[in-house]
Amino acid sequence: MSWRTIVATVLLIAGAGLELIAVLGLCTLRDLYDRLHYVGLVSYGALLIAVAIVVHSSFSLIGDKALFIGVFLVASGPVLAHTTIRSMLTRERGDWRSQIDDAARDERS
Amino acid sequence: MNEWEIAAAALGCALIPCILICLLAPAPHGLLAMEIAGVLTSTILMLLSEGFDRQPFIDLAVVLAPMSLVGSLMFARLMERSQ
């Protein structure tokens, strides 16, 4: 067994484990804002698996695309989490921009 | 069955709770489950591509990852409006 296979297997287990932990967290936690943390975590598992593929099969056609997907998912994770939390806060408490405008108007009058 | 296919099968099982949350939980929780399921599906396609040494699977993952992001952003935006 070559060192590449060993490193790729370790990265694969770590990545898959991270994704399974994220799903476990989604199932066990009850609050929406607690569950939101796992949206960012799950993409790091995808990145680890992409790196495992690159280590295993070098920069082949599959390896390049896997790395692209991993980096893309990690980059898009915070965007997704931020947009989701912003939408949920607006859904719960209304549009905060109009509240800021009202507060500024009250201060002026 | 190699290690890539085993990992793909394990992550495929992890999709089941996400689907159940999408079906049974309130809509905002379902959105989170859908976001996680999108990442999981992209990863499963990557693993299948490496496991079977077939390139079309990774092309599907390349398409799915941005589409999943756009879909989730649209759902979040529309959910903001529906009180």
Image (cartoon, rainbow, N blue to C red):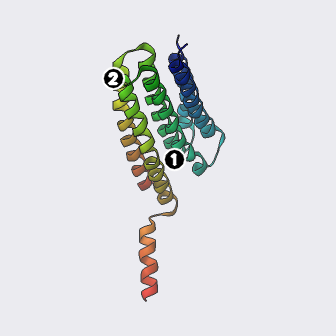
Q: Residue furthest bottom?
A: A109
Amino acid marked by disc 1: Pro
Q: Residues within 10 Å of mark 1 (few under 14, many from 20)?
A: many
Front-most of residues A27 and A54? A54
State the image quarter where residue A71 is shown: top left
Front-most of residues B32 and B64? B64
Front-most of residues B37 and B44? B44
Taking the spot 50% from the left edge, 58% from the top edge, the residue there is A89
Question: Residue B71 location, x and y as percent?
Answer: 38, 41
Relative horizontal placement of residue A61, taking residue B7 as reference (left or right):
left
Front-most of residues B52 and A8? A8
Circle 2 chain:
A
Callout in the foreground (1, 2): 2
Question: Residue A94 location, x and y as percent?
Answer: 47, 63
Question: Residue A75 location, x and y as percent?
Answer: 42, 44
Relative horizontal placement of residue A15, taking residue A98 as reference (left or right):
right
Marks 1 and 2 sit apart, C-alpha to C-alpha, by: 37 Å
Question: Residue B38 location, x and y as percent?
Answer: 45, 34
Relative horizontal placement of residue A32, taking residue A58 as reference (left or right):
right
> Residue tagged by mark 2?
A61
Q: Residue furthest front?
A: A3
Taking the spot 47% from the left edge, 59% from the top edge, the residue there is A90
In the picture, the disc for residue B28 is 1
Q: Is residue A20 above or below residue B30?
A: above
